[in-house]
Amino acid sequence: MDLSESGERQISWAARSMPVLTAIGERFALERPLDGLRIAACLHVTAETAVLLGALKAGGAQIALAASNPLSTQDDVAEALRAYGIGVHARAGVDRATYYRHIHQALDLAPDLVLDDGCDLVNILHTERTDLLDGVSGGCEETTTGIIRLRQMAAEDALRFPVVAVNDTRTKRMFDNRYGTGQSTLDGIMRATNTMLAGRVVVVAGFGFCGRGVAERAKGFGARVIVTEIDAVKALDATLQGYEVRPMAQAALLGDLFVTATGNRDVVGAEHLAVMKDGAILANAGHFDVEIDVRALDELADEVHRGVRPNTDEYVMSDGRRLLLLAEGRLVNLTAAEGHPAAVMDLSFSAQALAVQWLAAERASLAPGVYDVPERIDQEVARLKLAAAGIGIDLLTAEQEDYLHSWRLGS
């Protein structure tokens, strides 16, 4: 079969597990809330993303898409999207220069709204394509790393339009970051290495929602989990959940597998690489390939054996130790595996679609800055997901509503 046919099959398969987003797309097709809007997106080019873009296009939007990670791009899905009338500027495995050229090509659409996953597109708008800024009236950000960058831009009064922090919804953090990242990260590690986790020491850097999910899944496989943190409250939380908490300098001596999930750079640095065990595995679950210092790893190694297994490179140190880097230090779950299950992305992308609809309606009244997704959208997504699963919940009685909204009633 040709690429577009293969991609269409992948998209149809994903849509089976995305009933909420499918229903939103059907409503969008009737209401056309995005008619006439141009949207430039920088997202992972996967089947699940295709379902989201299909819903937005059904709502009337014209869309141009670039990849937020060249190693996660599914070429057959990209071809299917092109056949569907979406401008796709992405190809699997491109170099850094081509990656950024693709983002520029997506921006050539002169967008009204932008969708970002990691803030690269928004960053380029504010540094290299400032001629387009006056036409951009809003955006959405999908991941923790991007939100960190956007909040810093807002703090410095550098952000020129309102951006909705889709990543920060309760449903996204719980379902996507915690359960999705936990499962898909270990899926990628196991596909790349076929390693056994039971009895091994797994070091998880960062105990946010993503790190928490990885730690839980690794513990479930029988691993001894060590958590590293810079946040005292999160470190205390990890301790009370039964995890061992240590600084990375100590954990580096003990770990068999290291997984970074912090949104920061050089979490695993040269000083840690220098003391790791022979055979230690290095994987990154954060958005950018900066959490593991790959440049230091290159400098420390006497030999590098590429592709000893799919998505696995072996670095041989001067003392004979071998360190295994997965997915070139990029997102291991989207490079060595297929990313989150479609059922997980159903929630995240449903919130994204509804946030785009809200932003399209409200953008004229919003000042530049980072905005939370309205709580009613988060609740609607969770309610629709429960309904699709055939799960019911209680409703407040009138008396209970009165009790919650009155301070005059006693105990």
Image (cartoon, helix red, strand yellow):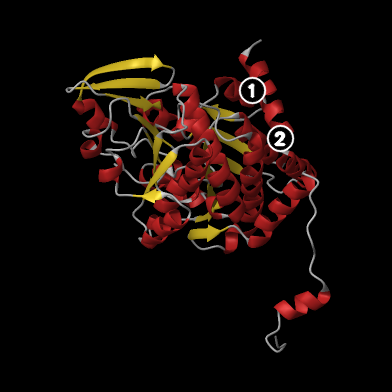
- Pointers 2 and 1 in contact (CB under 8 A)? no
Q: Amino acid at mark 1?
A: Ala
**Label 1: how many residues lie within 10 Å, few (<14), some (14-19) or many (20+)?**
many
Circle number at residue 261: none
Task: Residue 361: tell me if it is visible.
Answer: yes
Residue farthest along the left direction in this orientation: 318
Residue farthest along the front direction in this orientation: 199
Specify the quadrant of the image occupied by residue 154. Answer: bottom left
Helix, strand, or loop for circle 1? Answer: helix
Helix, strand, or loop for circle 2? Answer: loop
Residue farthest along the top direction in this orientation: 1
Q: Residue at x 71, y 49 (%)?
A: 33
Quick one: quadrant of the N terminus? top right
Task: Residue 91: tell me if it is visible.
Answer: no
Quick one: quadrant of the C terminus? bottom right
Residue matched to label 2: 17
Earlier residue among tags 2 and 1: 2
Residue matched to label 1: 80
Locate residue 89, reporting x and y percent. 51, 27
In the foreground, 192 or 343: 192
Locate residue 115, reporting x and y percent. 54, 44
Q: Amino acid at mark 2?
A: Ser
Locate residue 156, reporting x and y percent. 35, 60
Residue 17 appears left or right of 202: right
Mark 2 or 1: in front is 2
| Vertical arrangement, residue 348 with respect to residue 88, above or below | below
In the foreground, 257 or 327: 257
Specify the quadrant of the image occupied by residue 99. Answer: top left
**Label 2: how many residues lie within 10 Å, few (<14), some (14-19) or many (20+)?**
some
Q: Residue at x 53, y 46 (%)?
A: 142
| Vertical arrangement, residue 371 with respect to residue 408, above or below | above
Real-space Cα separation, disc 2 to disc 1, in angstroms: 19 Å
